[in-house]
């Protein structure tokens, strides 16, 4: 009877120790994670920016649309050497790519003093 109770005590004691070791490992892992998170947070918060120069810390990028560039001047294809470019030019400028058509502007009416007299007589 003494041996059996003694072995039970040893097995339960070893389980307790295992549990304690496991708990220690878990606590250490949690503590390690917490410290790593705090360290990351400190690194993120401590940017090397001098006061007054915050806006200069990141370069600004300006984006330009293709429409700001005028590609209509010059020839891109010679003697139908590049059919795809010829087709694009045909769509853009009309049937003959050599005939550069400028966008049509509405003709401005020249000042006519008779029109002004006509408008004032209507009032």
Image: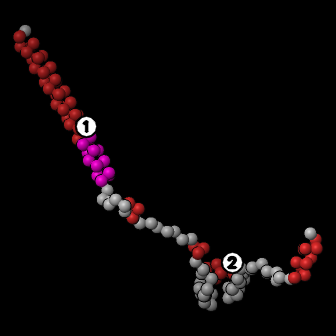
Q: CA distance from mark 1 to mark 2?
A: 68 Å
Q: Residue at the spot x=59%, y=85% of the render? A: 76
Closer to us: mark 1 or mark 2?
1
Was residue 115 drawn as part of the magenta stretch in this picture? no
**Label 1 environment density (alpha carbons within 10 Å; few <14, some 14–19, many ≥20):** few
- Picture quarter with the C terminus: bottom right
Q: Position of residue 13 (x, y in %)?
A: 12, 21
Residue 106 falls left or right of residue 18: right
Q: Residue at the spot x=26%, y=40% of the render? A: 34
Q: Residue at the spot x=37%, y=61% of the render? A: 52
Which residues lie in the magenta part? 34-46
Name the quadrant containing residue 28: top left
Q: Position of residue 65 (x, y in %)?
A: 56, 71
Name the quadrant containing residue 115: bottom right
Tell me, yes or no, if residue 46 can be seen here: yes
Specify the label residue 41 is tagged with. Answer: none
Decide which of tag 1 and tag 2 comes sooner along the chain. Answer: 1
Main SS, magenta residues: helix
Residue identified by numbered label 2:
91
Q: Residue furthest bottom?
A: 79
Q: Nearer the viewer, residue 3 or 17?
A: 17
Residue 27 falls left or right of residue 101: left
Q: Nearer the viewer, residue 99 or 48?
A: 48
Q: Position of residue 45 (x, y in %)?
A: 32, 51
Q: Answer above or below: position of 70 versus 39.
A: below
Tell me, yes or no, if residue 87 can be seen here: no
Specify the label residue 30 is tagged with. Answer: 1
Residue 92 falls left or right of residue 1: right
């Amino acid at each position: 009877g003494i041996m059996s109770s003694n072995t039970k005590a040893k097995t339960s004691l070893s389980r307790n120790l295992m549990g304690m070791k496991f708990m220690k490992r878990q606590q250490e892992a949690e503590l390690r994670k917490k410290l790593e998170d705090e360290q990351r947070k400190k690194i993120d918060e401590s940017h090397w920016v001098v006061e007054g120069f915050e806006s200069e810390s990141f370069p600004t990028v300006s984006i330009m649309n293709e429409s700001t560039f005028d590609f209509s001047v010059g020839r891109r294809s010679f003697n139908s050497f590049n059919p795809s470019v010829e087709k694009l030019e045909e769509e853009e400028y009309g049937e003959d790519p050599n005939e550069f058509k400028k966008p049509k502007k509405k003709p401005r009416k020249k000042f006519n003093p008779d029109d002004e007299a006509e408008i004032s007589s209507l009032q």
